[in-house]
Amino acid sequence: MTTALIVAKQCVIMLLYMSVGYVLFKLGKITKSGNLQFAKLLMSIIIPLMMISATQVEKTAVRTTGFLIVLVISIVAHVIGILIDRLMIGDKDGDVKRRIAGFGVVYSNAGFVAIPLVKAAYGTDAAFYATAYLLIFNIISWTFGFARLTGGFKNISIKKIFFNPGVVGAVAAIVFYLANIRFPSVIAIPINAISEMNTPLAMIMCGAFAAQTKLGDYLKDNLTYKVTFLRLLLIPLVTLAVFKGISVLFGNTDIIKTVIGVCLIEASCPVSVATSFMPTREGIDGEYACGFIIITIILSVVTIPFIVYLNTLI
C-alpha cells in the first residue's frame, strides 16, 4: 500500500503542474506555438539527457541483468498492447481517427509521466531500468506504431527508427554505462539539472494542451471511452497478470520485483504525447489525439496507483 500511496502523491503533484500550464495558457502567457516548442525541447534534449543521467551509475552484474530483463518484458508489454489494439480497435475503411486511437492504446507516456513515478516508487536508481523500456518504446513506436498511423510499413524510414532523439539518447546512455564512463561534475551537474526539468515542463505543456482542447467533444465520442478503458485498465491488468507469470519463471527476487514494478508503471501510464506529435509530423491531424492524452492523464491519477496497489497484493 505504501508504494501505491507514494505513486498517488506523485500523480497529484504532476496534476498540479498541469494546472499551472492550463492557467498560463488561458492567461495568454503560453501560446500554441510556444507550447509546441516546449514539446520539441522535451523530446529532442531533455528526455535523451534524462536517460543519460539515469545510467550514470556503477556497472554491476545485478543492474546489467535487470536491464536485460526489462528489454525482454518491455517487448512483451508492447506486444500485449498491439494485440489488444487489433482485437478491440482494429482498422475500418482506413479511418484515420481509429488509427490514432489504436496508436494511443498501445503506446503509453513512458517518458514524461512514467519516469517521475518510477523514481518516486522505487528510487532514483530505478530510472536506470526505465531507460531500457524507453529504448524498446522508441523502436516499436517508430516501426509498428508508424505503420499503424500511416496504414502500412512501406513508408517506414530506417533513419527515423534509429536516429530519432529517443533511440540516440537511450543507446548513448547504454554505451556510457557499459563502458563505465562517468562524467566529471562540471558535465554531470548541468545534465542532471536539465533532466530534472522533465516533470514540471512536460506537465505544464500538457496543461497548455488541455486548455486548447474541447474535452466535451471527446465525451461524445465512443472511441474516447474505449481508448481510456484499454489504455488505463485492460492493458495494465493483462500486463500485470503476464508479468506475475514471468516473475515465477525468473524467480521472485528483489531485482525481479523492482524491474517488473518499473515496467508495470510504464505500461499503465496514459496515452503517449507521441500520439499527437507523430501524426502531425506526417501531415495527419494529430490534434485529434489531444483529448485522449488529457483525459487519460487526469484519470491516471486514480488508475496508476490502483494498478501499483494490485501489484503489491498479488
Image (cartoon, rainbow, N blue to C red):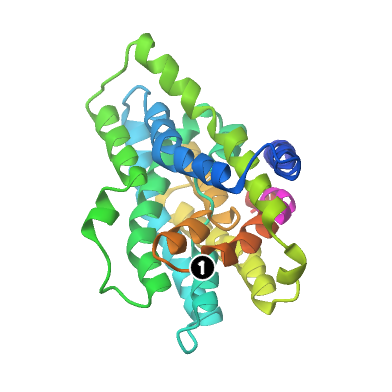
Q: Please state the horizontal and vertical placement of residue 295, each as a whole percent of the image.
A: 70, 59
Residue 300 falls inside the magenta stretch: yes
Which residue corresponds to the image point at 53% horizontal and 27% vertical from the top-left? Answer: 196
Which quadrant holds residue 35? Answer: top right
72 and 231: which one is in front?
231
Residue 162 in the magenta stretch? The answer is no
* First to last magenta residue range: 298-307
Judging depth in this view, the residue of 57 and 149 nearest the camera is 149
Where residue 83 sits: x, y (%)? 46, 74
For the C terminus, the quadrant is: bottom right
- Image quadrant assignment for residue 118: top right
Query: Can residue 113 be seen in this snapshot?
Result: no
Figure label count: 1
Residue 158 is left or right of residue 214, and the answer is left
Asked if 161 appears above or below 125 in the picture, the reply is below
Q: Which residue was labeled with disc 1? A: 285
**In the displayed structure image, the side of residue 204 where residue 180 appears, left or right:** left
